[in-house]
Amino acid sequence: MLRTHRIRISDIYVPTARRKTLHPETVRHLAEDILENGMKMPIQVRHDGKRYILVEGLHRIEAQKWLGETEVDAYVVQARKH
């Protein structure tokens, strides 16, 4: 079973190709939902020995930033490099 880790957002690298898929309107709606209901699903990151790399959850991490959060709940998974 996966365990949730609290990770500083500044320690998470978002690959350039992933950043291109960001939709600001989705981030705003998601941030509003997080305020009302909390974050329902942690993001997924992998650790390459030096840093955490975002695997899944770009809009969730951006919504957390938009809300002024400095940390996010995350699952550390083993995943292929993108």
Image (spheres, rainbow, N blue to C red):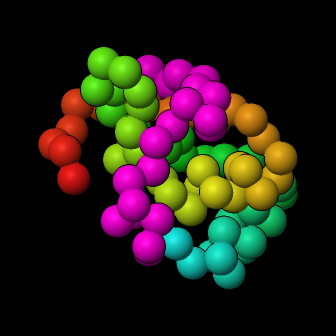
Q: Is residue 74 visible?
A: yes
On screen, 21 above or below 47? below
Name the side, left or right, on which 2 lies relative to 8. left
In the image, residue 7 lies at what x, y percent? 58, 26
Is 13 a magenta residue? yes
On screen, 70 above or below 28? above
Of the 4 image quadrants, the one containing the N terminus is: top left
* Residue pictured at 62% horizontal, 35% vertical: 10
Outermost residue to the left: 80
Instruction: State the residue in front, 68 or 1.
Output: 68
In the image, residue 44 lies at what x, y percent? 41, 41
Is 77 a magenta residue? no
Instruction: State the residue in front, 65 or 28.
Output: 65
On screen, 19 above or below 43? below
In the image, residue 33 lies at what x, y percent? 75, 63
* Residue pictured at 55% horizontal, 31% vertical: 11
Q: Is residue 34 visible?
A: no
* Residue pictured at 53% horizontal, 22% vertical: 5
Q: Report the number of discs.
A: 0
* Residue pictured at 34% horizontal, 65% vertical: 17
On screen, 46 above or below 64? above
Instruction: State the residue in front, 52 or 26.
Output: 52
Name the side, left or right, on which 59 lies relative to 67. left
Name the side, left or right, on which 33 lies relative to 60. right
Extent of the magenta region: 1-21
